[in-house]
């Protein structure tokens, strides 16, 4: 089978476009942290929003394509309410055949259980809410920081 230079150029261009396209999305999230032992301990907790990129169970891929921090906030009210926003872009490896939207999750650093800083990771269920809509799942379903 013989390919013309023009055919090869078009095929190369299609492959490159499929690799370099990316889907960018932003999140506006509001939620609430709860520390049943002492609600004042939620003060100064750090809430970060991250975009999951590589599979967490395959360290080699995670090293090549690590998760991206999209934004952060510090809780400054005793009621534990936080507002955080951020943006991320994921490469659409299959081009227009499959849109790869960012998968946002939260990392929370807190001292609810002791003076030692702890970190928890929270994945919202079926997180498909992107700006300009506000993801408020954790306002109605607060994140409880107490250890069981």
Image (spheres, helix red, strand yellow):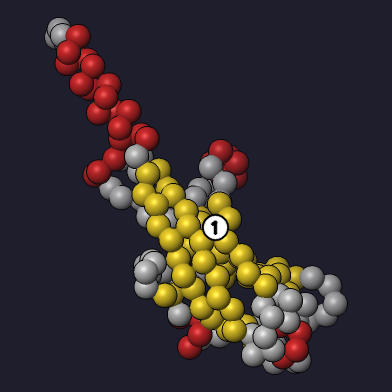
Quick one: quadrant of the N terminus?
top left
Task: Let me know if residue 33 appears in the view.
Answer: yes
Could you say which is closer to the camera, residue 141 or residue 56?
Answer: 141
Residue at the far right: name it: 115
- At 49% from the left and 73% from the top, the residue drawn is 29
Residue 15 versus residue 30 in the image, above or below? above
Which SS class for mark 1? strand
- At 67% from the left and 72% from the top, the residue drawn is 74
Could you say which is closer to the camera, residue 122 or residue 132?
Answer: 132
Q: Is residue 89 left or right of residue 17?
A: right
Q: Is residue 1 left or right of residue 119?
A: left
Q: Position of residue 61 (x, y in %)?
A: 54, 41
Quick one: quadrant of the C terminus?
bottom right
Snapshot quadrant of residue 97: top left
User: Where is mark 1, residue-wise?
Assistant: 70
Residue 140 versus residue 58 in the image, above or below? below
Q: Position of residue 43 (x, y in %)?
A: 73, 81
Q: Position of residue 108 (x, y in %)?
A: 65, 70
- At 22% from the left and 22% from the top, the residue drawn is 11
Task: Let me know if residue 143 appears in the view.
Answer: no
Could you say which is closer to the camera, residue 24 or residue 103?
Answer: 24
Q: Position of residue 133 (x, y in %)?
A: 37, 73
- At 56% from the left and 52% from the top, the residue drawn is 68
Q: Is residue 132 left or right of residue 55?
A: left
Residue 44 versus residue 67 in the image, above or below? below
| Disc 1 residue crowd, few under 14, some 14–19, many 20+, Cα 10 Å | many
Q: How many marks?
A: 1
């Amino acid at each position: 089978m013989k390919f013309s230079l023009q055919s090869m150029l078009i095929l190369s261009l299609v492959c490159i476009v499929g690799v370099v396209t990316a889907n960018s999305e932003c999140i506006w999230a509001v939620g609430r942290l709860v520390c049943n032992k002492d609600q004042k301990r939620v003060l100064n907790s750090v809430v970060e929003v991250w975009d999951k990129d590589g599979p967490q169970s395959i360290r080699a891929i995670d090293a090549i394509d690590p998760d991206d921090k999209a934004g952060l906030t510090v809780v400054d009210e005793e009621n534990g309410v936080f507002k955080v926003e951020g943006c991320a872009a994921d490469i659409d490896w299959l081009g227009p055949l499959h849109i790869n939207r960012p998968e946002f999750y939260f990392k929370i650093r807190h001292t609810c259980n002791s003076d030692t800083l702890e970190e928890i990771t929270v994945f919202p269920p079926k997180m498909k809410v992107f700006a300009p809509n506000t993801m408020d799942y954790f306002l109605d379903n607060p994140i409880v920081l107490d250890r069981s």
